[in-house]
Image (cartoon, rainbow, N blue to C red):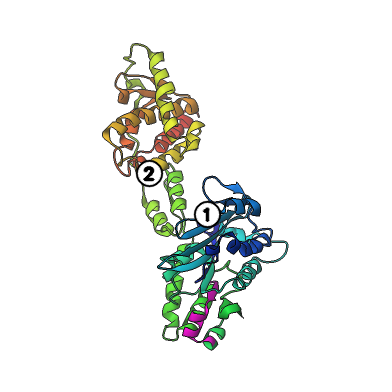
């Protein structure tokens, strides 16, 4: 797996904080920022806005007209987004209260790997630096940073808990902005002599500096060494070796390791590790899931031993399974798992993962379970019929009802009950595993 595939949920994160709140002046306080946004590089410029309700096409006249929708009791938030690649979210927040006054400007570019795409007018570094430079002329900056958002959240920086908190100088990042108070606290000459790739003084006494020419290699050995050297320069009491060791340890989280999941449930587990991402402990999750083996599928009989139908009307029973129960499953999950409407093999792991992730095996009442078991079992049975050419053998007791595929009778309602009987049951007794075993055996018999 490539580093970008491993770290696919990451984004580039740029945040600037000021101890003033120009948005407290209303729309006229926002307009200078809109001038900057409207002049952004074409690859960063937003075209939609979000205030209250659905996203709207961004235009300054419309934003002026609806600006009141962005205002709360003591906070004003305007979110501008980009509808096409690269994905950009630009959020301007101003707050004036008895406790605090601040303004934050946050830019997210998603995913982080987009920074590797070539631009016709040069590298991605300059637009970010230029944006900071321009905004610093509009309002005094107290601090700011630009970096991998995931690596930032894995750091010990105080701003991970409170964005407007002053940096505690336990971390440095790719792009760093220090306001006049922090600069004077460290010593202006010490700050200006920091070993770095770029250093410049900003208006109002702030300083902007970069540890590396580009944010792309933030977790590389070269970047970690640059970060460690800069931090130790700013805080001479720190040890270069221990600082570098801590950064290298963090870089391991971005280093891919082989994925060796059990093939029948690999799609479920892969969706989980991708959902949690590096920030959610991807490395540990992969190591854990590499060891996981689901229990063998037990919900089957030899076809020759399957009880004959004991219902009064076989067709009516099958129609109930297919037309009532399975449709109930689709109605319940189509918004969260739209693939269930298609009934394709890909829908199975998506549904299993949703049941597992949403704790359906544990956080439901007895009545909900008794309603969901027929729906899930019928939908699984439908997959066996439609995708593998199976044949229903209905029984009065649902859990005895089978689908014959080749020389086996599979028991989808029994599997559904097992899958909804515990926190990890949707994984341990997944629909996906039963279906894939049935598919594998059917193919072997066909050859």
* Residue closest to the eye, 291 or 247: 247
Location of residue 80 in the rendering, given as x and y in whole percent from the top left corner: 58, 55
First to last magenta residue range? 173-188
Distance, label 2 to label 1, CA atoms, is 32 Å
* Residue hosting label 2: 358
Residue 199, image x, y percentages = 60, 80
Label 2 vs 1, first from the N-terminus = 1
Lateral position of residue 41 relative to residue 95, left or right? right
Q: Is residue 313 above or below residue 199?
A: above
Residue situated in front as seen by the camera: 310 or 234:
234
Number of dots carrying numbers = 2
The residue shown at (36%, 19%) is 394
**Can see residue 2?**
no
Q: Nearer the viewer, residue 431 or 196?
A: 196
Query: Residue at the location (61% across, 69% down)?
Result: 135
Callout 2: few (<14), some (14-19), or many (20+) C-alpha neighbours within 10 Å? Answer: few
Q: Give the secondary structure at mark 2.
A: loop
Q: Nearer the viewer, residue 88 or 246?
A: 88
Q: Quadrant of residue 124?
A: bottom right
User: Secondary structure under badge 1?
Assistant: helix
Examine the rendered structure and indicate whether residue 51 appears above or below residue 33.
above
Res 316 quadrant in image: top left
Give the number of the disc on residue 70: 1
Residue 435 seen anywhere in this rendered image of the structure: yes
Q: Residue 397 at x, y = what percent?
A: 29, 21
Asked if the magenta segment contains residue 179, the reply would be yes
């Amino acid at each position: 797996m490539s580093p970008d595939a491993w770290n696919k949920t990451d984004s580039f994160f740029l945040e600037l904080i000021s101890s003033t709140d120009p948005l407290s002046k209303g729309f006229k306080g926002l307009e200078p920022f809109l001038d900057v946004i409207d002049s952004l590089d074409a690859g960063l410029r937003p075209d939609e806005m979000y205030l209250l309700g659905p996203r709207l096409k961004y235009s300054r006249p419309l934003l002026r007209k609806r600006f009141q929708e962005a205002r709360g009791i003591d906070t004003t938030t305007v979110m501008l987004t980009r509808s096409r690649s690269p994905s950009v979210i630009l959020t301007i927040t101003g707050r004036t209260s008895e406790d605090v006054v601040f303004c934050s400007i946050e830019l997210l570019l998603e995913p982080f790997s987009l920074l590797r795409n070539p631009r016709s007018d040069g590298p991605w570094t300059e637009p970010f630096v230029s944006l900071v430079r321009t905004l610093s002329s509009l309002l005094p900056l107290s601090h700011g940073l630009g970096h991998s958002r995931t690596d930032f959240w894995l750091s010990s920086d105080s701003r991970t808990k409170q964005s407007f908190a002053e940096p505690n100088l336990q971390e440095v990042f790719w792009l760093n902005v220090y306001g006049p108070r922090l600069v004077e606290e460290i010593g202006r000459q010490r700050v200006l002599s920091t070993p770095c790739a770029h250093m410049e003084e900003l208006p109002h006494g702030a300083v902007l500096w970069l540890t590396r020419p580009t944010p792309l290699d933030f977790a590389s050995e070269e970047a970690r060494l640059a970060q460690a050297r800069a931090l130790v320069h700013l805080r001479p009491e720190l040890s270069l070796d221990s600082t570098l060791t801590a950064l290298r340890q963090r870089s391991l989280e971005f280093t891919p390791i082989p994925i060796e999941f059990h093939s029948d449930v690999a799609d479920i587990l892969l969706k989980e590790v991708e959902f949690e991402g590096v920030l959610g402990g991807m490395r540990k999750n992969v190591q854990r899931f590499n060891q996981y083996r689901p229990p063998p599928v037990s919900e089957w009989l030899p076809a020759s031993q399957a009880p004959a139908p004991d219902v009064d009307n076989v067709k009516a029973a099958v129609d109930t399974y297919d037309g009532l129960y399975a449709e109930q499953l689709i109605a319940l999950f189509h918004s969260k798992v739209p693939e269930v409407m298609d009934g394709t093999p890909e829908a199975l792991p998506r549904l299993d993962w949703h049941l597992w992730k949403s704790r359906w095996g544990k956080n439901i009442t007895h009545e909900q379970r008794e309603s969901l078991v027929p729906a899930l079992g019928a939908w699984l049975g439908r997959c066996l019929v439609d995708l593998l050419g199976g044949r229903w053998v209905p029984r009065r007791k649902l859990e005895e009802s089978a689908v014959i595929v080749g020389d086996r009778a599979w028991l989808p309602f029994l599997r559904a009950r097992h899958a909804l009987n515990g926190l990890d049951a949707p994984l341990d007794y997944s629909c996906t595993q039963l279906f894939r075993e049935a598919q594998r055996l059917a193919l072997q018999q066909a050859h």
